[in-house]
Image (spheres, helix red, strand yellow):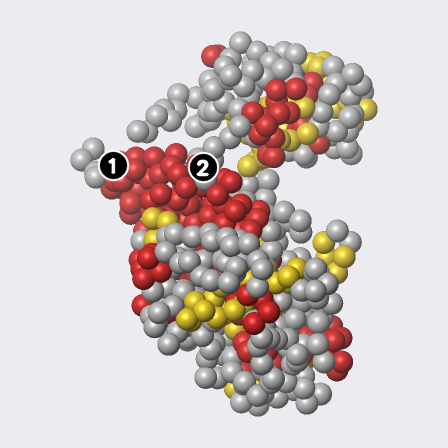
Amino acid sequence: MHTLKMKAGVNLASLQEYEMETNVVTNGYRGSTLPNVHAYVNVNGMWDLPAAIEQREFDIQEDISDRLDHSEDSSILSTENALKDNPFHVTFITDVQMHELHTDIGANGSGLIGEFESLPFGEHQPCYVGKRQENISKNRYKTIFPYDHSRVILKASVDNSDYINANYIKDSDEKIAYIATQGPKNSTINDFWQMVWQENVTQIVMLTNLMEDDKIKCSQYWPESTDEEYYGDINISKCEERHFAFYVIRKFTMSNSEGSRVVTQYHYTKWPDHGTPDPFSLVVFHSHVLRTKTAEIEAPKIVHCSAGIGRTGTYIAFDSLCKEGKSKGTINVASYVKVMRSCRMNMVQTYEQYKTIYLALNEEFKAPVRTKSISAFRESMQHFFREDSPDHIIFQKEFKSLSDIKPVCTKDDFRDGTLHGVNTEEEEMLQLDRYNLYLTPTVSHRGNYIRAIYVSSFLEENAFIVTQYPSENGAVDFLRMIIDNDSDTVICMDTLAEIESSTAWLPEPSLYKPVGPYSLQHEGGSEIDVKVTSVKIQAGTVKLSQDAIQANVFVTENINLALF
């Protein structure tokens, strides 16, 4: 017989409320044959489960693997006293079709909160090994321990200890696909690399920075330069480091007396400590991890943040549910988070992280990231410019898919614009407050707001500033923006003859033009494919820098951008 895991609130004599997992036999059905409806029950002497039990899968507490050591005391607390005098409550969680994700997120906000809050939280399995006196110093946080039944057991260690704060995590197919762990401490770096070696790991996903809010979140466990460093008996050398807008990729060669192999670290650098990442940025990062996986090696990915539960759980859930959605066409976020929490406590810590899983999945399935080699891209563009090319339809569908993941925004998302006189009812183009660019107070009697936002490139965060062409009144703020951001290139996508305020800041040839406290000088230009004007900006008669600010203004002429 398999068992249905239920969560029971326990009223003790002290009136303190505890939560524990209790096993309830479900009329002889095996967990693997039951669909995934979850019931959370405060028991009042009897169970009242609907017929839907016969259609969902329940058992998420099966043994992690034969490879795990079960020698530790894993006795389960008696639940006899837990089943007395408690109110009865049942919440059911159903599968979501991939094409319904966007609707489900938009229309079910309060439902998602209830779904998240219904999940078991806290310490529900024995953690005896992590609480031993000799292991306390190896834990980064005082209340986060690995469950004994799923912990990673080191086979060899310098101090003869087999302990590391890490757990095996199953994917949605019940296979061990991940190791969730804390960010290494100085005293556990050797243990970390020992785990990487013994588990045949080739991919490490790092989701925290070393320092955040002036607090150490993780020790640097890799060599800074290409010099070799020994961690215990394992030699690590860095052979490559590439920087992207939101993450860094590092490749290491690790070796010891048994051999060597290449390990890739994927370091996501823009996950706020007390917030959530942009879902699309997470999708792009995840895409890079997937497409650079070593196909011939089947080994778990190591995923860590600082504590190894919040961001780590969010990423693992997204990765596993991506695979599940592609194979089955449906996902069950709550079900899988419960699976993770049966392996390691409190995986996915906050509702905001929980919602991010949904948002990232929606991005992934509605507008997936697909990369092309340069040669493949060139070939597709050659086909595209043919009149009979079917690629026109493909690109139209691709562009439309972006509309399908457009976030639903409210007036609160444009609050700053509203405060500065932007009519959110009539404006066709509105900028979200979270992407706003703000000016420094270098000019008296001018505010810090400007109609401009930052946009990242693939390789550089905030690589571009997107804005409207300045009006005569806004020319001073436009120049402030150029100076604040050390911008040396301005690209105008409209013909200047079509812009009434084109002379608001751009001087005529060989002339100076005063704009507020600034003085602009026309330095020269050229006109071949585009018109290029070189402008020097000065603050009155005093240069802003040793060579003043140089702004090269590119003006496009007679280019038809309406490709579709």
Give the residue displayed 55% in from the left and 62% down from the top. 8
- State the residue at coordinates (21%, 38%): 389
Asked whether the residues under the numbered discs 1 and 2 touch, taking CB atoms below 8 Å apart as contact, a structural biologist would say no
* N-term mark: 1 or 2: 2
In the displayed structure image, the side of residue 9 where residue 362 appears, left or right: left
Instruction: Tell us which disc is closer to us: 1 or 2.
Output: 2
Toward the viewer: 310 or 133? 133
Provide residue 59's location: percent of width, then percent of height.
42, 68
Q: Amino acid at mark 1?
A: Ile
Residue at horizontal 50 percent and vertical 53 percent from the top: 89
| Residue 523 in the image, given as x and y percentages of width and height | 64, 23
Q: Residue at x 52, y 73 (%)?
A: 168
Q: Is residue 145 left or right of residue 395?
A: right
463 versus 178 height, above or below: above
Using the numbered discs, state the Cα–Cα distance from disc 1 to disc 2 in whole angstroms: 29 Å
Q: Is residue 402 above or below residue 24?
A: above
Query: Is 465 displayed left or right of 51 in the figure?
Result: right
Residue behind mark 2: 106
